[in-house]
Image (spheres, rainbow, N blue to C red):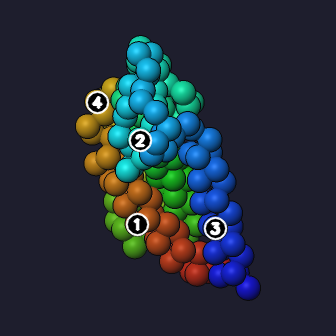
């Protein structure tokens, strides 16, 4: 049922897109020659007649390279921000599921052997140190992809640890 629904919606989308594209004026064989205010432009094996001054007849043709680059940059920036949120959330969940339980990592362990304020401070510091260079270099678009990948990888690691910690019972003391 779902596959039929998906194929039906895909067909409907393609059909709507073809109607939008066919709304443009196309030159048919034998219709005459272009006038002085139009020029022929070959586009996907169709001969479209456009105004000679370079103006577009369709809003789809008004997209410039700068706009496409801007959209791509905004999308990359959004995904990077989402990766930061995922990293902070996963780190917080790791700390929350560890709280009050015996800690196997000696660096995060408090004097009583449990995860507590010392562990929370160190986890927050590690996350802060990870994010500080990213925030300082946020205007370097070429670094967004590696930062995003690193953030999601670290968030995945913290999530796995949080899932593991959730299965461990708190001590009864």
Which residue is rendered at x = 36% and y = 68% of the image? 105
Which residue is rendered at x = 51% and y = 77% of the image? 164
* In the displayed structure image, the side of residue 127 where residue 62 appears, left or right: right
Q: Earlier in the sequence, mark 2 or mark 3?
A: 3
Q: Earlier in the sequence, mark 3 or mark 1?
A: 3
Q: Which one is closest to the eye, mark 3 or mark 1?
A: 3
Q: CA distance from mark 1 to mark 2?
A: 55 Å
Q: Which one is closest to the eye, mark 2 or mark 3?
A: 2
Q: Name the residue carrying label 2.
A: 47
- Pick the front one: 125 or 39: 39
Q: Secondary structure at mark 1?
A: helix
Task: Assign the N terminus to one quadrant of the image.
Answer: bottom right
Q: Secondary structure at mark 3?
A: helix
Q: Earlier in the sequence, mark 4 or mark 3?
A: 3
Q: CA distance from mark 1 to mark 4?
A: 26 Å
Tag on residue 140? 4
Q: CA distance from mark 2 to mark 3?
A: 25 Å
Name the quadrant containing residue 92. Answer: bottom right
Q: Are marks 1 and 2 in contact (CB under 8 Å)?
A: no
* In the displayed structure image, the side of residue 107 where residue 29 appears, left or right: right
Which residue is rendered at x = 64% and y = 50% of the image? 19
Q: Secondary structure at mark 2?
A: strand
Q: Name the residue carrying label 1.
A: 157
- Pick the front one: 50 or 149: 50
Q: Which one is closest to the eye, mark 1 or mark 4?
A: 4
Residue 98 higher or lower than 131, as above or below: below
Instruction: Give the x, y percent position of residue 111.
Output: 44, 60
Q: CA distance from mark 4 to mark 3?
A: 41 Å
Tag on residue 11? 3
Seen as rendered, the residue at the extreme left is 142
Q: Are marks 4 and 3 in contact (CB under 8 Å)?
A: no
Q: Earlier in the sequence, mark 1 or mark 2?
A: 2
């Amino acid at each position: 049922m779902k596959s039929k629904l998906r194929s039906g919606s895909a067909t409907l989308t393609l059909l709507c897109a073809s109607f939008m594209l066919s709304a443009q004026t196309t030159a048919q064989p034998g219709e005459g020659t272009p006038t002085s205010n139009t020029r022929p432009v070959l586009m996907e094996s169709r001969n479209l007649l456009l105004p000679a001054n370079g103006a577009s007849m369709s809003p789809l043709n008004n997209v410039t390279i700068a706009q496409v680059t801007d959209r791509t940059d905004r999308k990359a920036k959004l995904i990077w921000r989402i990766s930061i949120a995922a990293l902070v959330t996963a780190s917080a969940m790791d700390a929350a599921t560890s709280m009050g339980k015996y800690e196997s990592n000696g660096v995060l362990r408090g004097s009583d052997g449990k995860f507590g304020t010392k562990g929370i401070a160190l986890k927050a510091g590690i996350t802060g140190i990870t994010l500080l260079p990213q925030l300082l270099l946020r205007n370097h678009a070429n670094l967004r992809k590696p930062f995003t990948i690193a953030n999601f990888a670290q968030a995945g690691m913290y999530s796995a640890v949080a899932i593991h910690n959730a299965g461990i019972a708190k001590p009864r003391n």
